[in-house]
Amino acid sequence: MSEKLFNRILVANRGEIAVRIINACRLLDIPTLAIYSTADKDSVHARLADEAIEIGPPPPGESYLAIDKIIEAAKTHDCDAIHPGYGFLAENPLFPEACEKTDLAFIGPPSGAMRLMGNKIASRIKMAEVGVPLIPGMQAAGDDIESFHRAAEAAGYPVLIKAAAGGGGKGMRIVHKADDLQSSVEAAMRESKKAFGDDTVYLEKYIQDPRHIEIQVLADHHGNTIHLFERECSIQRRHQKIIEETPSVALTPEARARMGEAAVKVAEAVDYKNAGTVEFLFDKEGNFYFLEMNTRVQVEHPVTEMVTGVDLVVEQIKIAAGREISEYARTAVQRGHAIECRIYAEDADNNFLPSSGEIVYYQEPSGPGIRVDSGVRSGIVVGVDYDPILAKLIVYAPTRDLAISKMIKALKDYPILGIKTSRKFMIDVLSHEKFKAGLTYTSFIEEHMSGIQPDFEAVLELAVAASSAALAADQGSPTKTTVSTVQNSPWQSIGPWEIGARISR
């Protein structure tokens, strides 16, 4: 570029999103400074950045959440901007405030917009003022249990108790009858206090079997606010998204336009700047309701990039540097279909418990329309200090059916040995007839994926990959340099499986 946007950007995150930001900076010819905890000293993001410094020990409060340390690192190493990624400090308004006080550009929204949209009650009040559709329920926190009873009777059971200060399913309870309301409110308050330091909760109508649809927005400092269409994120477990796609099969062109207009209205109402996502619930009658706004880049942003061709992280950086949204983004259209699967280090056969250990063999799939956003490699030790997401596998195809087929094949061509991952569970979801039919509601996993049995074919594929890795290591091939020496063989690392049990069925 003819003029450098920033002198250097500090990447205040880790894992795959840190790698994603570093790669965007490279496109813009901007040097990067990575931070890492002692647990991440050999991480991919630390090696990829132009410079990397240790920020503290593994506990996030002493490293990736330590605002003062991060600001000091930025100033000491001649950075003039910070990108928070997602998670950690990305939605903590104290972080952009600290940047504003030290003349560091925060690659995200202003602290005021972040603070307002981070409080679900305040944001509901604001959305009501500007006419954005809301789920029936409280417009403010309940003062006592009687106020919850009145709101529940007005909305009609079932109702949902939600934490005002948080998300991710914490501080959330579904209540089906009045006798359970008080205990549910009290439990939600305790959980919210523990998770967010704030026990404020409120109540709204529980929408049964909705779709979770979000709209990507961009807003610059020149009066431009646009949306880049929707992502459907209905495939969730424990209120956490695991598979996302665009476009949504549920939306007509008219519904898409109305939701896009509502998302832009949300952003403009709070004077939002940079990239953000407005989330809605979409019911079976075609009504949509404001849920919340995520004031950061989303985990699932790549599917939007695949169907529009717009690099959202590059747009973020340019907007933070004072540039207008690119003309290409302002005129973007949806083409084809994209799906993303989040690859977690967790055991789907054991209540999705986190899986830790050394990745003894790792090989990403490749080919036309296949993208992997990853923060791992062979030899990396996956611990339990941080979110278990390892990578995101994204595919693009002309149609949804082809995208599903491509994703299933790519997942089968994605061996990750040494730890348990969600890879096989994703194949099961994508192969389900209801998913293929587009019947993807937020209750999908609870209704269709409980008690699923191990897939013998998938286990054999892993076994073959493990055998190849072990043989290559024994023969001294180049693979040996990336497969770490461990006490257990790759065969043992796969986990328990039985041939006879499957054949006898």
Image (cartoon, rainbow, N blue to C red):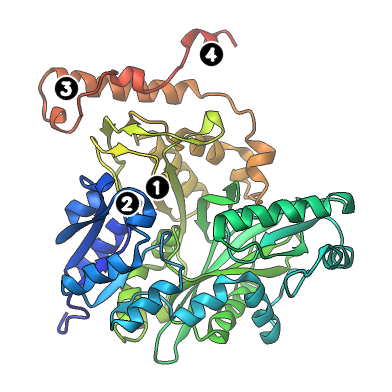
Amino acid bearing label 4: Arg
Expressed as whole percent of the image width and height from the top left, the position of residue 202 reads 72, 65
Label 2 crowd (10 A; few <14 / some 14-19 / many >=20): many
SS at circle 3: helix
SS at circle 4: helix
Q: Nearer the viewer, mark 4 or mark 3?
A: 3
Q: Earlier in the sequence, mark 4 or mark 3?
A: 3
Real-space CA distance between mark 4 and mark 2, rounded to the nearest whole angstrom: 37 Å
- Quarter holding the N terminus is bottom left
Q: Quadrant of residue 289?
A: bottom right
**Residue tagged 4:** 502
Q: Is residue 91 left or right of residue 60?
A: right
Real-space CA distance between mark 4 and mark 3, rounded to the nearest whole angstrom: 30 Å
Q: Earlier in the sequence, mark 3 or mark 1?
A: 1
Q: Earlier in the sequence, mark 3 or mark 2?
A: 2
Query: Up-down: is 119 above or below 175?
Result: below
Q: Any mark on residue 473, and which? A: 3
SS at circle 2: helix
Question: Does residue 311 appear anywhere in the picture?
Answer: no
Amino acid bearing label 3: Ala
Real-space CA distance between mark 3 and mark 2, rounded to the nearest whole angstrom: 27 Å
Q: Nearer the viewer, mark 2 or mark 1?
A: 1
**Residue tagged 1:** 386
**Residue tagged 2:** 15
Real-space CA distance between mark 1 and mark 4, rounded to the nearest whole angstrom: 35 Å
Q: Earlier in the sequence, mark 1 or mark 4?
A: 1
SS at circle 1: loop
Question: Does residue 361 appear anywhere in the picture?
Answer: yes
Q: Earlier in the sequence, mark 4 or mark 2?
A: 2
Expressed as whole percent of the image width and height from the top left, the position of residue 296 reads 44, 69
